[in-house]
Amino acid sequence: MKILAQKYIWTITPEIPRAGEGSAVLLQDGRVFLVYSRFLGGGADHSKAELVGGILSLQDGSLSEERVLFTAPEALNQMSVSLERLQDASLAILFIRKLTPITDQIFFSRSTDEGKSWSTPVNCSQCCPQYPYLVVNNDRLRQFSNGRLAIPVNLYAHGAHTPENLEASRIGIIYSDDNGRSWQLSAHIIIEQEDIIAPPVISPDHPEAWDWCLKHQFKQQEPGVEQLLNGSIYLYCRTVLGYMYHARSYDNGSTWTALKPCFDLPSPCGPQSIRRIPGQKRLLCLYNDHHGQAFAGENWNWRTPLTLAASDDDGQSWQNLGEVEDNQHNYCYTSMLFLDDKLLLTEYESENKEDGSRRNLAYFKMQLITGF
């Protein structure tokens, strides 16, 4: 693996203290179209934010033809964007619109002119009003070989950041079989107690941390999906249990096997990103590698280093290809776009310190990698 370029797309200012959670797509003219969230006046998840799109320069990380997409003055913010090239050659965009701290909606739109204009967004979350708060990460929208569109989603029945949440978190997919005109909710799952495996080493300084994890249902978070070579669907998610957990579906995401730990990918509670190299059997995974670290030990929660892993057996096993970023900072909410023999990724980079109750988000960054 070789890193060809590292460039900052955005650095913080007092007016814009946070930017990121982006997604990129290759246009038919060979240029890269990037959309990301730009926060205005605050860095929290519910601070005011807008979706910004533009043409990304792979030479210096700058954006040209930059513009704001899908304005919604009544919303708290718009964030967590996905871009995907569909089988009919149109572009799809997906994003979250946060209405209040405990309610949000997911919107889907298409473009038939390479992102110059977009259709009226469809509210995908109308299919599940029983879940007023939904979490969808950036760069998560997928289209399966049969045409099904899939949105991996974290479902909350009582809104975010409430005590009831701890017993109400589920994961699954919202899917469409008519190119995004209507949407349905799949069966959803949790990590069952009998499928939990303790990490091999738990910090003796914080044995209570593992006990806390076992007591609560807020274990499975921020899922993603990828189609496997045999047509089945691979679902993965970050957890508070020391590993990425994964499951499979053999009916295009309608039902799922049990969520099990992926022992090859020990991780803090930070999101992973998985995509298949086009035309190959190899899956690539970006994650925060915690091999050799004691669960709940010093700096366990830090999302660092950023590591690239590969699977040649559809996620049954993973091998470490090396660090994309070392442990000097936190790295998360990545996106992946393959450009011939290169991988373009975007990421957050934040300082290894706490700013109040959250990490101090700082930079939005791109990298160009080859040799994977």
Image: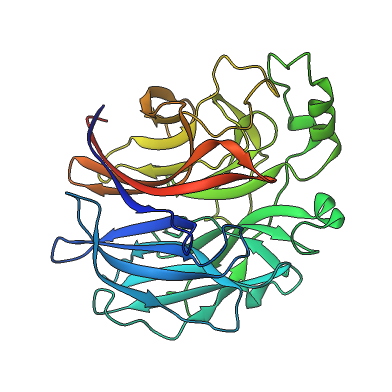
Q: Which quadrant of the view contains residue 136?
A: bottom right
Q: What residue is shown at x 73% (from left), y 17% (from top)? A: 202
Quadrant in the rendering for residue 174? bottom right
For this view, does 297 lie left or right of residue 152?
right
In this figure, which colouring scheme has been used for the structure? Answer: rainbow
The residue at 33%/69% (across/down) is: 53
> Looking at the image, which residue is at 55% across and 23% down?
290
Q: Quadrant of the C terminus?
A: top left
Does 297 sit above or below residue 357? above
Viewer-proximal residue among 22 and 286: 22
Between 306 and 223, the residue placed more toward the observer is: 306
| Residue sitting at x 72%, y 75% | 129
In the rendered image, residue 322, in percent from the top left (x then y), is placed at 36, 23
Q: Could you say where residue 18 lies in the image, as x and y percent from the top left?
A: 49, 56
- Asked if residue 139 can be seen in this view, the reply is no
Q: Position of residue 47 (x, y in %)?
A: 60, 65
Residue 339, given in percent of the width and then of the height, sits at 21, 48
**Residue nearest the observer in this picture, 63 or 372:** 63
Task: State the residue lying farthest toward the left.
Answer: 29
User: Is 349 on the left-hand or right-hand side of 201?
Assistant: left
Q: Is residue 29 left or right of 109 when viewed as pictured?
A: left
**Which residue is at the front of the view, 351 or 171?**
351
Quadrant of image for the N terminus: top left
Q: Residue 349, can we see it?
A: yes
Q: Going by the picture, which residue comes out furthest to the bottom?
A: 120
